[in-house]
Amino acid sequence: MHKDALHGKWEHRDIHNIYGLYVQMATAEGQIQRSGGVERPFVLTRAFFAGSQRYGAVWTGDNAAEWDHLKISIPMCLSLGLVGVSFCGADVGGFFKNPSTELLVRWYQTGAYQPFFRAHAHLDTTRREPWLFGPENTALIREVIRQRYALLPYWYQLFYQAHKTGMPVMRPLWVDYPKDTATFTIDDEFLIGSDLLVHPVTEEGSRGVTAYLPGAEEVWYDVHTFQKHNGAQNLYIPVTLSSIPVFQRGGSIIPRKDRVRRSSTCMENDPYTLYVALSPKKFAEGELYIDDGHSFNYDTKKEFIHRSLTFANNALTSSNLCPDCNFLTSSWIEKVLILGASKPSKVLLKMDGKETPVDFEFDTSMSVLTLRKPGMNAGADWTLKCLMKESFVNIPVGPSYTTALISLRFIPFLRVTLKALKM
Amino acid sequence: MTCLHLLLTLVFAVSLGTPVEIQRPRGVPLTKKQFYEESKPFTCLDGSRTIPFDRVNDDYCDCKDGSDEPGTAACPNGSFHCTNAGYRPMFIPSSRINDGICDCCDTTDEYNSGAKCENTCKELGRKEREVLQKMAEITKEGFLLKQQLIEEAKKGQQEKQSKVTDMQENKKQLDEKVEALRTVKETAEQPEKEAKERHLKAWEEQKAAIRLEKDKAKMAETFLELDDNADGFVSVSELQSHAELDPDADGTLTEIEAQGLMGGAEQVDTSTFESVWPKIKDKYHSEVSREEADISCLVRCLLCLCVVQAQPTIKTPEKTHEDEEAMPPYDADTQALIDAAQKARDDFEEAEKALREMDDQIRNIEKELSFDFGPDAEFTYLYSQCYELTTSEYIYRLCPFNRVSQKPKYGGSETNLGTWGSWSGPENNKYLLMKYEQGTGCWQGPNRSTTVKLTCGKETVVTSTSEPSRCEYLMEFTTPAVCQEPANIDPSPHDHVEL
């Protein structure tokens, strides 16, 4: 169309680029109207503009089954996240041509940790359903898909935050570590929220990757092995075809639904497992957001649960971030894992004014405390207290108090000494 | 104590007429019941841990192998057994318990999800029994047909085998005959060749003589023509009147050039003209015959126009030179030799042709015998048959052991979907699948190929064609040759009481 063709008063050149936005917008609004304003729409688009994030997801378009295209999916979605378009992803496996088995597996691994996760291909390519590559590769792909589904509560809460604040779900490292110049050029590694660091393997035949763990004061826990690593270092990680280097930031709490299901709808009433990764200061915080997953009632009727989870002073507390919200869930907390913990002598659940003991296991080698079936409802107020072995240090004691204690002891001695010295 | 309990429960339940379920943890099959004894702590079936019995099915995964949670979805690898009274018992992954989807027909997998499942076991059981009954019938009849096919195949095999042996014999004889005739032919051809050569040579000589005569005559004629003043001499000036004789083709025949042609002489007589003649005879245009030629050409053209349908025997010679006469016929002796040789040749070729045909036939039969028609040759009857299936757009044609093709219903050329490759079924029975390969190429794709899936049926017919992957086709084909010996199934429709 000619650039100076008129649409009413507007020249085509002024509105050409927002056509894609309008198509997606109209489709989304049509879907909403169809349900009488009740159900949230889902519209995937390839053409978009600033503001398109309000109407649905985008994907990077017709890519090809090539390693370079896999690699570039990361900076493409990082850039889009920075301009507000968080719900981004690339066709897993590449649209044109046929991926090798290794490329397909690595793409599933990378795509599962990107916001929009979908496998797609041109009609004329050979079939590439994930179960067509032999039992080992099927198992690898199944494993990474399960990891994504387990993290859906975390993804969901990040999308709620993106919805409220615009903060990108998938972000470059420098967004959270703007003073760490080592993060400025990294585009093969990214953060999901502030708490999950992902460095997928995107090189053919790779035997190892070097991941940068940012933050001089941070620690990062490998989510598969719970191994702890210090921040501000380049970590060399040997990899095999099954490896997906993912780290949880020390100081964060990530809720997961670890039960295996066929679809997210089947997961609705499943229990949560809380992964509490402690910072060097033995502190952690996180959130839990739950709504019905399909309607606008979270907005029109405040039907959602938004809780703040905090671990401090050996106690994990869940407090209500939205007291005038009303939503009920049958989901409960089936397990709590505390990484970087010390072994308690007892663990108590304090809820509704009652205290009940909670069974636990402690893995000494990895410093992981597992609380077995605390059982509280995910929407309730509760505290889990870890009682440590009896010692002086039951009350928080700082250095100043100790000095005071010691100096109090010394004062009579000083008096005697001074007297003796006739000062 | 528990035994009594059990007995009482049994009696009570039986008197009520309800099917009895032996007490065991949810999801545990009867075969594993002994591992789940309420009164004892439970040891994971992989031996990794022992836990108090109240932790079995308590909705928390304690065992690595998932054996402590058969009846809940707590473990990712658990296994749930649904009894499905009235149908077939089934194992489903424990992750399907209480997920809102009705997986077991007896609804036992959704006991706490709010999903409203209906017990469909009776209905499913009835349907399956129907299907099984039908299949049993078909298998029975199909198997009988198969026996017939095997019989015929055996007979056919024997016939073909003996035919081949006979033909081999004949072939040997033919071979010898051919060789004999070859010798005869060669013996006859030798004198024929010689005789022909002689005749030809004589004819060539004759022709040469005639040509020489003609040439001489022409030369004399030309001399007379050139000799304008009829003084018995051809002078330079007389020669010059024929400008076409110009040797350097510059348009004029100069005196010097003319002299040159005459070999330096001023004039030549008939004898010396003989040396001049060769130099000019090609270029020389006859004065008289030119006019004559013009007239005769004209006359002939008119004749042509009038007599359109010229009789083929009328020769219209265009050449102004004398005609090449036809070679005179062979003399009697030579002709006799030729005839003899020809007959020998004919006999030989006839015999050779017969030999070739015999060879082809033998090869065809041997090819047929070489095919793998199944362990009892039950597929023999498919050879050289073709089976068609018409869909909305195409006519698909399967010629077993030969090729598969597709032709548009409303006109268009045939596309080759593959030629016979091999049997490609699974290891335990490769005769369940046929592979046809190297068909017409696909644009930017593989060569078309077809897999034919064989199932037991009373009729031999193609039941469907599909294209599960681009340019890779799948045909479903029923034939009695694939029917197995029917086992004795008792399709009595009554509920089995769970033991």
Image (cartoon, rainbow, N blue to C red):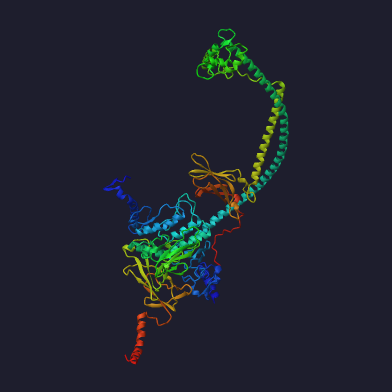
Q: Is residue A417 visible?
A: yes
Check the picture and name the quadrant holding the N terminus of chain A.
Answer: top left
* Vertical comparison of A319 with B154: above or below: below
Where is residue A119? Give x, y as percent. 45, 56
Who is closer to the viewer here, B232 or A119? B232
* Vertical comparison of B467 with B269: above or below: below
Q: Is residue B118 visible?
A: no
Q: Quadrant of residue B3?
A: bottom right
Q: Quadrant of residue A351?
A: bottom left
* Vertical comparison of A106 with B316: above or below: below
Check the picture and name the quadrant holding the C terminus of chain A.
Answer: bottom left
Q: How many marks?
A: 0
* Vertical comparison of A21 with A259: above or below: above
In the displayed structure image, the side of residue B52 where residue B359 appears, left or right: right
Q: Quadrant of residue B4?
A: bottom right
Where is residue A97? Give x, y as percent. 47, 51
In the displayed structure image, the side of residue B372 where residue B113 appears, left or right: left
